């Protein structure tokens, strides 16, 4: 079927595949492309829809992709639009927008692993959008597959009827043909009217250095033609469509797309922030009054400082960040200065994986050499005058006398774990100031534990400790639930009574003594001895919570005194003491770069 032969909405099926990480989503997409002969065996490569090298290496989908598949079925011709979704909790919003563009979701569950955290999270997203859900068991060819146990878990945890569940193997291609037939039978066709004003949902955007910003969209009402003037609902900016097309699987230009169809366009859009994921495209002549629901601006949750290893490379890092931001509107950065590390940037990310990916892309694609500081989160500070400040950097924190209340971000976390590791998980969550909300058994061996936790507590070592405490069997999903009052304090580091801004940090009062002692001890080991005494202190306001002393180098001034009165020795020692005191007042301690890195750099 060529791209202009869609005469009825009943010929279109828009569907998505949702799954936990590593349950075979990208492999199943490969098999569907292969079975429908859209991609020849020669062209097909592993994870065909994952275009980034990083996606292939890590086995995760970072960017949404789409593919249009013409398919003949029972004397009719159909167009299947497979809208691929990212699989990680950090990209939850992108997943929700991709699902909003579909009518049906294929729920893929690993027959060896069973229902996991992301499986449930994505199902609830799909149910929110009122999608038809088709449960599918994958990896049935493996000897360790336990289909009956996993079917029981799906029915118990999700409440889906699994009496006629499809059992497939994405690796071997077994029953993939049945899955495609089931999608056509069970997936409802899209609704929409071509006479109505244009209403299309953006579910992905990226930057092309020749054409500007490219937009992936799904049309709900109206149509888009090449040369038409369109308008973005949130910014009210207008653009002329210079290129319109579909991915099948490579880019293919078309002149026209109607209701229910999925495609891409270029319209001389200069900045990716003008085509945000979740925004609505409408016609400039007859714009719609109600946009597609669910649009929100991406809110960075994790912050860290990125600094060049050498000051001369500052401009190179700045250019690399600007180019990367063109492809990722959720990533934000602003210049900052540190007494320790010089000129750099304060960067905001959706989560820890997002931060990791941005850093790796900077190092690989732009050959940037970076120093990354330890990650921190955003706090809300209410001042005594009633003003609400958002603080992402401890140096911006007002003085304790001006603070009425500090609120910290909280998340709700679902942890799926085998029952023998429940004790380890509960102990870890309690240690991290968690509040237990629920614990339920999916089966005799699988448990879902729900906790509310301060976000700052999971930023450092939570994932590593969870995985090591459960031998890698735990999986988790979390969502941001809001800012709640917390007993947070700013921990300052003073060297010989002088505060060092770069080493300040925001911590919970309970942990302040421990963190202060660790900081002081770490600095003591790294700062070299001087000719005078160096005192390292950690303080909360004016209260000292930890103190370490680096003793001065000493010359044995009494060596020349042999015999005689003790007062002669005391006189020489007193003279030396006065000299050391004077030196301490005048002496300036050069804190080495390694000292800052040891404290600031994330492990």
Image: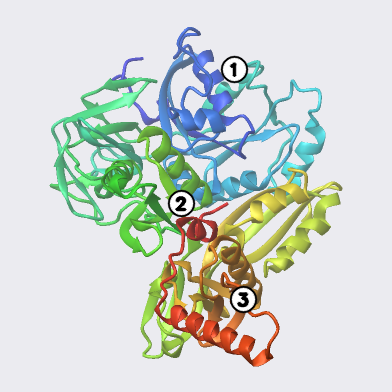
The answer to which of marks 2 and 1 sits earlier in the sequence is 1
- One can see residue 437 in this view: no
Q: Residue at x 24, y 49 (%)?
A: 274
Where residue 281 sits: x, y (%)?
26, 45
Where residue 240 sits: x, y (%)?
14, 38
Q: Residues within 10 Å of mark 1 (few under 14, many from 20)?
A: some
Viewer-closest of 556 and 2: 556
Q: Is residue 219 above or below residue 255?
A: below
Q: Residue at x 57, y 46 (%)?
A: 122
Circle number at residue 560: 3
Look at the numbered disc 3 and give the secondary structure of its residue: loop
The answer to whether the residues at label 3 and label 1 have Cβ atoms under 8 Å apart is no
The answer to whether the residues at label 2 and label 1 have Cβ atoms under 8 Å apart is no
Q: Is residue 372 above or below residue 574?
A: above
The answer to which of marks 3 and 1 sits earlier in the sequence is 1
Viewer-closest of 400 and 141: 400
- One can see residue 577 in this view: yes
Q: Gap between marks 3 and 1, in whole Å?
A: 97 Å
Callout in the foreground (3, 1)? 3
Look at the numbered disc 2 and give the secondary structure of its residue: strand
Circle number at residue 177: 1
Look at the numbered disc 1 and give the secondary structure of its residue: helix
Where residue 467 sits: x, y (%)?
71, 47
Q: Which residue is mark 2?
A: 372
Viewer-closest of 142 and 299: 299
Circle number at residue 206: none
């Amino acid at each position: 079927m060529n791209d202009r032969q869609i005469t009825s909405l009943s010929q279109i099926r828009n569907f998505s595949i949702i799954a936990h990480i590593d349950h075979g989503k990208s492999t199943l997409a490969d098999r569907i492309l292969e079975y429908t002969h859209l991609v020849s065996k020669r062209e097909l490569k592993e994870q065909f829809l994952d275009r980034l090298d990083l996606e292939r290496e890590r086995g995760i989908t970072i960017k949404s992709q789409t593919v249009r598949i013409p398919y003949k079925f029972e004397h009719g011709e159909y167009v299947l639009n497979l809208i691929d979704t990212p699989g990680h909790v950090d990209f939850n919003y992108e997943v929700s927008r991709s699902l909003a563009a579909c009518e049906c979701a294929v729920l893929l569950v690993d027959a060896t692993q069973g229902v996991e955290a992301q499986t449930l999270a994505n199902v609830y997203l799909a149910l929110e959008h009122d999608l038809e859900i088709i449960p599918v068991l994958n990896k049935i060819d493996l000897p360790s597959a336990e289909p009956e146990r996993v079917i029981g878990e799906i029915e118990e945890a999700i409440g889906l009827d699994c009496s006629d569940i499809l059992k497939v193997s994405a690796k071997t291609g077994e029953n993939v043909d049945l899955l495609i037939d089931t999608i056509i039978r069970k997936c409802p066709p899209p609704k929409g009217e071509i006479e109505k004003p244009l209403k299309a949902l953006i579910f992905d955007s990226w930057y092309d250095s020749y054409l500007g910003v490219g937009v992936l969209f799904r049309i709900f009402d109206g149509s888009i033609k090449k040369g038409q003037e369109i308008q973005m609902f949130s910014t009210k900016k207008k653009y002329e469509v210079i290129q319109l097309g579909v991915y099948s699987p490579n880019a293919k230009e078309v002149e026209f797309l109607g209701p229910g169809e999925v495609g891409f366009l270029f319209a001389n859009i200069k900045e990716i922030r003008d085509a945000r994921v979740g925004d609505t495209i409408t016609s400039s002549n007859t714009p719609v009054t109600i946009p597609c629901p669910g649009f929100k601006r991406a809110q960075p949750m994790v912050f860290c400082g990125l600094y060049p290893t050498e000051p001369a490379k500052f401009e190179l890092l700045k250019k690399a960040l600007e180019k990367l931001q063109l492809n990722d509107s959720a990533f934000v950065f602003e210049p900052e200065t540190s007494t320790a590390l010089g000129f750099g940037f304060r960067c905001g990310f959706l989560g820890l994986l997002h931060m990791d990916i941005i850093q790796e892309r900077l190092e690989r694609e732009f050959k940037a050499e970076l120093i990354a500081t330890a990650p921190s989160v955003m706090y809300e500070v209410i001042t005594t005058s009633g003003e609400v400040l958002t603080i992402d950097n401890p140096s911006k924190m007002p003085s304790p006398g001006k603070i009425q209340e500090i609120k910290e971000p909280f998340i709700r976390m679902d942890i799926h774990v085998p029952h023998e590791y429940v004790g380890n998980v509960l102990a870890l969550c309690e240690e991290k100031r968690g509040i237990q909300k629920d614990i339920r058994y999916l089966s005799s061996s699988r448990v879902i534990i729900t906790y509310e936790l301060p976000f700052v507590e999971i930023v450092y070592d939570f994932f590593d400790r969870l995985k090591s405490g459960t031998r890698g069997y735990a999986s988790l999903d979390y969502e941001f639930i809001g800012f709640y009052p917390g007993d947070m304090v700013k921990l300052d580091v003073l060297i010989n009574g002088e505060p060092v801004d770069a080493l300040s940090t925001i911590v919970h009062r309970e942990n302040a003594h421990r963190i202060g002692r660790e900081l002081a001890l770490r600095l003591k080991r790294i700062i070299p001895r001087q000719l005078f005494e160096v005192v390292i202190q950690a303080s909360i306001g004016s209260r000292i919570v930890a103190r370490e002393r680096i003793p001065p180098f000493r010359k044995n001034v009494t060596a020349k005194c042999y015999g005689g009165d003790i007062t002669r020795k005391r006189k020489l020692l007193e003279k030396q003491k006065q000299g050391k005191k004077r030196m301490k007042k005048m002496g300036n301690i050069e804190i080495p770069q390694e000292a800052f890195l040891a404290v600031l750099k994330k492990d």
